Image (cartoon, grey):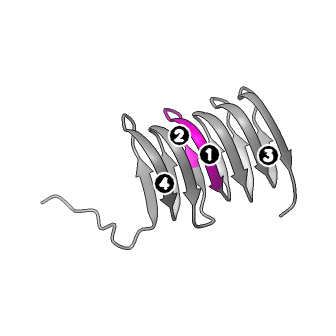
Amino acid sequence: MEASLNISNQNFSLLGKGSKIKGTFIFSGLTRLNSSIEGEIVMESSDDLYIEKDAVVNGHIKCHNLNIYGIFEGTILATGKVCLFPCSQLTGKVSANQLEIHPGALVEFEGHTSES
């Protein structure tokens, strides 16, 4: 007998590889994006938002913490920390409390950090 996964009490979102979506998205809980996304992304909670390695995101993000492994083009407003990992690519504007750029990340942005 195959065990079922009970997600009724879980608070997370996952958009998988191969999906292509457009629009305004409001997430709560840990969120991992591994899709092609165009539009606005708003995190209602202070949980982390991940742009995974195979993701291509174009638009505007409002969140607390953002971890980028994939490609992002647009505007980021983060009340916490934005981390750019070695395989990431960022083009656009960034406003964050903290900004961490790992060696190997490709960045072309206008940005600033400020305390919340």
The CA distance from mark 4 to mark 1 is 10 Å
Mark 3 or mark 2, which is nearer the start of the sequence?
Answer: 2
Judging from the image, what secondary structure is the residue with disc 1 in?
strand
Q: Is residue 5 magenta?
A: no
Mark 4 or mark 2, which is nearer the start of the sequence?
Answer: 4
Judging from the image, what secondary structure is the residue with disc 2 in?
loop
| Amino acid type indicated by mark 3 | Leu
| Amino acid type indicated by mark 1 | His
The one nearer the camera, 32 or 25, is 25
Indicate which label's residue lies in the foreground, 4 or 3. Answer: 4
Residue 24: where, in percent of width, then height?
49, 52
Instruction: Provide the residue designation for mark 2.
Output: 52
Instruction: Provide the residue designation for mark 3.
Output: 99
| Amino acid type indicated by mark 4 | Phe
From the viewer's perspective, is residue 56 above or below residue 42? above
The residue lying furthest to the bottom in this view is: 9
| Amino acid type indicated by mark 2 | Glu
- The image quadrant where one finds the N terminus is bottom left
